[in-house]
């Protein structure tokens, strides 16, 4: 119910940013594993040299058995849980202990030589995320002569972005005109975002490959229905 306030700021977009402690050891081991998996992929073996962009299958939970991998997965699940709880403050009718975080898919991507991943959203899940494992250090990455500070960032497009194509732009709707947000790739950093949020990996060119882990999750109550609202049959 609306309160008699002069302005209502509605429909914010929650994004969680988390850091894995002592990530260097985890990242170093898993980058080697990913590079080995890429090298033995049949599609990559058929090519004369590695492609600029590579994405694994999304079944890494079934394919990797390592302590470092288990540590990363636990960190992802715990971070999603924190983000979901904070984002839903005031939306749930009561506290939801024992939330079940179901990983619907988890995969890695390796990019270089100016490759990118175009604008997209993720389906069949409520939250997604990207964990940065390797990239050039910022003083090197951001000084690329063409790509500059946007080199390898993840760019998120706000809900208003789709309205800009046909909307008149003037001084009165300046709040619409800052329609995207760039989040720098930082090894050990995890960004958790709603799966409906349009985003892209901007072109990356560097000495080190840009290596990231992406995932989709669904979130369920420990017991009972996942639906907050009941609908009567007519």
Image (spheres, rainbow, N blue to C red):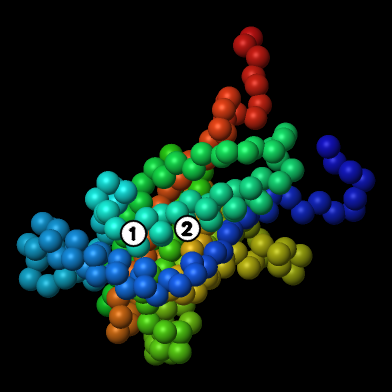
33 or 194, nearer to the observer: 33
Task: Kindly indicate the quadrant of the structure image that contains residue 44.
Answer: bottom left
Crowding near pointer 2: few (<14 within 10 Å), some, many (20+)?
some
| Label 1 vs label 2, nearer the camera | 1
What residue appears at the point 41 percent right and 59 percent down from the top-left corner? 71
Residue pointed to by mark 2: 75
x%, y% of residue 167? 63, 57
Figure quadrant of the C terminus? top right
Element at label 1 = helix
The residue that label 1 is drawn on is 67
Q: Quick check: can you spot residue 166?
A: no
Who comes first in sequence, dot 1 or dot 2? 1
Horizontal and vertical percent position of residue 18: 54, 64
Considering the image in quadrants, where does the N terminus appear?
top right
Estimate the x, y position of residue 141 in percent, counting from the top left. Answer: 41, 84
Q: Which mark is residue 222?
A: none
Answer above or below: position of 69 versus 146: above
């Amino acid at each position: 119910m609306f309160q008699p306030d002069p302005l209502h700021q509605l429909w914010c977009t929650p994004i969680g940013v988390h850091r894995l402690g002592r990530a260097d050891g985890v990242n170093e081991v898993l980058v080697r594993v990913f590079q080995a998996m890429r090298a033995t992929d049949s599609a990559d073996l058929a090519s004369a040299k590695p492609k600029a962009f590579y994405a694994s299958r999304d079944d890494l939970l079934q394919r990797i058995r390592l302590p470092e991998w288990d540590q990363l997965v636990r960190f992802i699940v715990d971070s999603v849980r924190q983000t979901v709880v904070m984002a839903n403050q005031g939306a749930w009718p009561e506290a939801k202990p024992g939330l079940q975080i179901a990983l619907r898919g988890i995969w890695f991507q390796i990019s270089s030589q100016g490759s990118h991943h175009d604008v997209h959203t993720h389906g069949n899940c409520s939250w997604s995320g990207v964990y940065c494992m390797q990239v050039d250090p910022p003083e090197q990455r951001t000084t690329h002569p063409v790509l500059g500070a946007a080199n390898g960032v993840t760019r998120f497009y706000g809900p208003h972005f789709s309205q800009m194509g046909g909307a008149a732009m003037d001084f009165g709707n300046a709040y619409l005109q800052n329609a995207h947000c760039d989040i720098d790739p930082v090894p050990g950093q995890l960004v958790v975002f709603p799966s409906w949020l349009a985003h892209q990996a901007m072109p990356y060119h560097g000495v080190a490959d840009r290596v990231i882990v992406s995932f989709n999750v669904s979130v369920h109550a420990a017991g009972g229905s996942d639906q907050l609202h009941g609908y009567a049959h007519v």
